[in-house]
Each structure stands twice: as C-alpha cells, then as structure tokens.
Image (cartoon, rainbow, N blue to C red):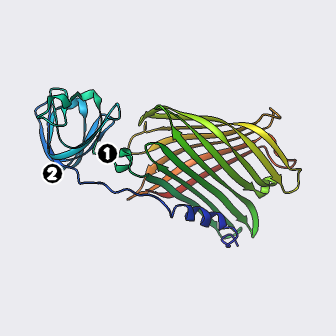
Amino acid sequence: MLFSSKRLRPVLLLLGAVVCSNVALADSPPASGEVVLKDGSRILGTIVDARDGVVTVETDFAGTISIELDKIQSLSTSGPATVILEDQTIVENQPLKIENQQLAVNSTDPAKNYSIESLSVINPEPWELGRGYKWFGELSFALVMERGNSESDELDYRLESTWRSVQDRYRLLARGENDEVNGEKSADNWLLRGKWDYFLDDPNYWGLLAQVEQDEFSDLDLRWLAGPFIGRQFFDEPLFTLAGEFGVAYVTEEYIVAEDDDYGAANWDINVTSDLLGGDSQLYAHQFGLWSLDDPSDVVIDTTLGLGFPLLFNFQAAAEILWEYDSGAVDGVDELDQTYRVRIGYSW
C-alpha cells in the first residue's frame, strides 16, 4: 500500500524535526502613536513596526496601513519603543519621534538625534535583539489518487524549516515522492538536507552542509555528502532576492546494483525570488548542483521553477516544475527526470 508505515517513515522523521524550536515572545506591546504625512494627512494608531523603509500602523478606522518612510513629515509614540539603527546600534525603551528628517529616540537629549536614513527597524522581533531564534517554514503535500480503468496513487511531501538568530542560522529541507500505478511502485525517493550558517560581515556567511538521499528507481540506495561552503546574499529586496552558495564536499554513493563510488565534489546552491506579479504571489527558482572533481563529466543538477500564492489563513499553494539531471545515471535510467506538480501547504 502507498501509505504503509515504511513508506511514510521519511515523513514521520521530518515532522519530528519540527517539534523542537526556540520561539521568542515580544517583550512589550507596540506603542500607540501619531503619523503626519507630507500632504498634511494625520493618522492615529499603533506603530506596529518599521523596516525596509516602510512603517506599519494599525488603525481603528482602516486596519493595517503601510506607509513609506519618505512620505512621513513627523511621527511620534506615546510610550517607549525599541529601535535598531543601520550600524546595528540598539536603542531600547525610549520615546520615539521623527521630525524634519531627524530621528529622536529621546527628544530631551539632542545627542540622541539621528538622520532618518539611519533608521533600520522599529519594534524589532526578540531574535533581532540577540534573544533566541526565530522559527519559520513551510510544510506542503501534493496528493493524487485515480480510480477507474487504472489505479494510481501519488504522494509528494516537502518540508522547509529555518531557525534564525542574529549570529547564525539552521536550515532543514526534506522532500520525497511515493507513487504507485495499478499496485506497482513507480517512484520511491526522498532527500534530507541540513545546513548551518554563520554570518560574517553583511551580506556574507559561511556554513556546513550535510545531505542524504535515496532513489530506488535510479538504483541509488544512498548518496551521502558533507562539506563547508561560503555564501552571499547578493540582493534582498521583495522585487528581487538572490542568494548564492559555493562549497566542496565529500560524496559517497551506494547503489542497489551498480558499483559503489566515493569522490570529492564542488557544489553550489542558488535561490531567487520575486514579487513581480504582485498580489502576495511569489515567483521562485532554486538550483542545487554537484560536480565531481574526479570526473568532470559527472554532474548532478536539481532545478525548481515555481509560482507560490496565498490561500486562506497561513495556507498557500504552489505550481512548479522540477528538473533532476544526473549525467552519471546508471544504465537503463534516464539522465533527466521532469516533474510537474501543484502543492498545498501551511507556512508559519
């Protein structure tokens, strides 16, 4: 059966991996305040936060409003607020005032006035203050069941989870596919990837990678790899984000029929996202590559192109294409495997 305990073992493992996390709670509620725009409009509400040049205000009359910082003439809070400046200076629990392009975290002390351009975050999350980790991720499934002239069952699952602090980051990826046609298995594979990143001078970081995968129908019993890498966040704007990593790894391949192998390899990991289409939708592309240093003709490349869009609450859907290329595939196995799928998931 498609959903036997043996086949669901990778799913249970990845679900167990998300049980433990450090979730930090806010120290104090955001302060109420007043915002006056350059066109003379006056807005009363709660200053929820400010980041990336946008101030978020929760109002009684219009819900949540996002205001670009360069459109604000003045801003003030009735209670204390916490601010992070561009140079990572943290000013905690001080009244906040913006006027004449100047940021004053204590209006009675002129020495604590800063240019408006130096403002990075208002009311940061606890992890941004060096207190614990922020945990976020997504768990999604694609399930197809057909009955009639033929019977087919398909189950794809995917988990992405991240634990982020000011200094480091842990990332987990788990995915798999189990398919049956007329009672016969047609696909049975899974992959588990873990990364640890240590941040250097922004936007650079270095880290360690460990990965294991299995694909019965590609004759791959297990492929293990581990090694260091360096990374850089080249662009980090909603319209276009680009992160790239390059590293080296030691690879061990154990086959069901073919001869086992081990070798050194170069690897890369590229992630691109964009909100170009608007409406909270997101275009994304990801590529992970593995290039043998012993045999330059031996290359493994996994590429995903997709479009994600929100549903209700924290649920979302994604339509994507996955290309899996292995130039060293054993005899009788295609070098390129192409998959089209629609996933439904929950993000946190």
Q: Which element carries disc 1, helix, strand or loop?
A: loop
The front one of 5 and 80 is: 80
**Quarter of the image where the C terminus is located:** bottom left
Q: Which element carries disc 2, helix, strand or loop?
A: loop
Q: Position of residue 291 (x, y in %)?
A: 74, 36
The front one of 148 and 232 is: 232
Q: Is residue 330 left or right of residue 31?
A: right
For disc 1, the marked residue is: 124
Looking at the image, tell me whether mark 2 or mark 1 is earlier in sequence order: 2
Q: Nearer the viewer, mark 2 or mark 1?
A: 1
Q: Is residue 124 left or right of residue 184?
A: left
Q: Identify the residue at horizontal 62%, vertical 39% (top origin).
A: 287
Q: Identify the residue at horizontal 85%, vertical 57% (top origin).
A: 256
Calculate the distance from the C-alpha at mark 2 to the C-alpha at mark 1: 25 Å
Q: Position of residue 290 (x, y in %)?
A: 71, 39
Binning the other alpha carbons within 10 Å of mark 1 as few (below 14), some (14 to 19) or many (20 upward) gives: some
Q: Position of residue 334 (x, y in %)?
A: 80, 46
**Figure quadrant of residue 301:** top right
- Res 320 label: none
The front one of 23 and 191 is: 23
Disc 2 vs disc 1: Cβ atoms closer than 8 Å? no
Eyeballing the image, is 35 above or below 159?
A: above
Of the residues shown, which amino acid type is indicated by label 1? Answer: Pro
Of the residues shown, which amino acid type is indicated by label 2? Answer: Phe
Binning the other alpha carbons within 10 Å of mark 2 as few (below 14), some (14 to 19) or many (20 upward) gives: few
Q: Identify the residue at horizontal 72%, vertical 60% (top origin).
A: 188
**Figure quadrant of residue 1:** bottom right
For disc 2, the marked residue is: 61
Q: Position of residue 38 (x, y in %)?
A: 15, 29
Eyeballing the image, is 243 above or below 304?
A: above
